[in-house]
Amino acid sequence: MQIAIVLYDRFTALDAIGPYEMLCRTPGSETVFVAERPGPVSNDRGTLTLLAEKALDEVPRPDIVVVPGGPGQRDQMGNETLLGWLRAAAATSTWTTSVCTGSLLLGAAGLLRGRRATSHWLALDTLATFGAEPTGERVVVDGKVVTGAGVSAGIDMALTLLGKVADDEFAQSIQLGTEYDPQPPYDAGSPLKAPAAVVGRLRDGTSVFR
């Protein structure tokens, strides 16, 4: 089983690393970072670099595709090299997945038409423009497409996927081994829960997060 995690300039690190840490332990699997060209790819802060071991065309038929989000996603929306690869890979993949605004790239590739899907809460409205049915759920499974909401939801997405490609007990063992037991100090992880002022800062772009 080959798991391909897509990288592009200014991806969000946890979108890629969260799923990697869960999925790389899948029995009988090979996890590979891929990009348009092999080599170092920098995250959205420009302070962390991951190595794309292979070019997209070197990995034509992965079993699982993972597409992270990040500010750099906007620059990829018209990149036919990437979008064409996503379409071709999805035609033969067992699972095609995304984290955060990575789902917008799946949408731009035409892979979400008629499907329920999620994304970062600030991007949900955009999903509808690609013929998707947006939902604020943290993880959405629709056929062989699995989408995760914003950033940290990539861990939940990957654990959900592990339960399907291995089994629930294996997925639970990975959750336990990584001690993924969220107990956040604030109940502000959703726009439905966070203080209005905090939500407003993210909406208008004044938060340091964007």
Image (cartoon, grey):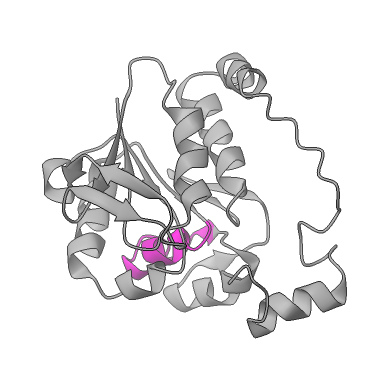
- Name the quadrant containing residue 193: bottom right
Whether residue 132 can be seen here: yes
Name the outermost residue toward the left: 58
Magenta extent:
100-116
Point 17% across, 48% down: residue: 38
Q: Quadrant of the N terminus?
A: top left
In percent of width and height, residue 37 lies at: 16, 54
Q: Quadrant of the C terminus?
A: bottom right
Name the residue nearer the viewer: 83 or 55: 55
Point 21% across, 39% down: residue: 53
Name the outermost residue toward the front: 47
* The magenta stretch spans residue 109: yes
Name the residue nearer the viewer: 176 or 42: 42
* The magenta stretch spans residue 165: no
Position of 124 relative to 152 (above/below) = below
In percent of width and height, residue 75 lies at: 33, 74
Q: How many marks?
A: 0
- Name the quadrant containing residue 175: top right
**Horizontal side of residue 16 vs 140, given as left or right:** left
In percent of width and height, residue 23 lies at: 45, 29
In percent of width and height, residue 174 lies at: 58, 20
Whether residue 146 can be seen here: no
**Horizontal side of residue 93 vs 163, given as left or right:** left
Point 54% across, 18% down: residue: 167
**Horizontal side of residue 168 vs 113, given as left or right:** right
Position of 157 relative to 169 (above/below) = below
Point 76% across, 56% down: residue: 189
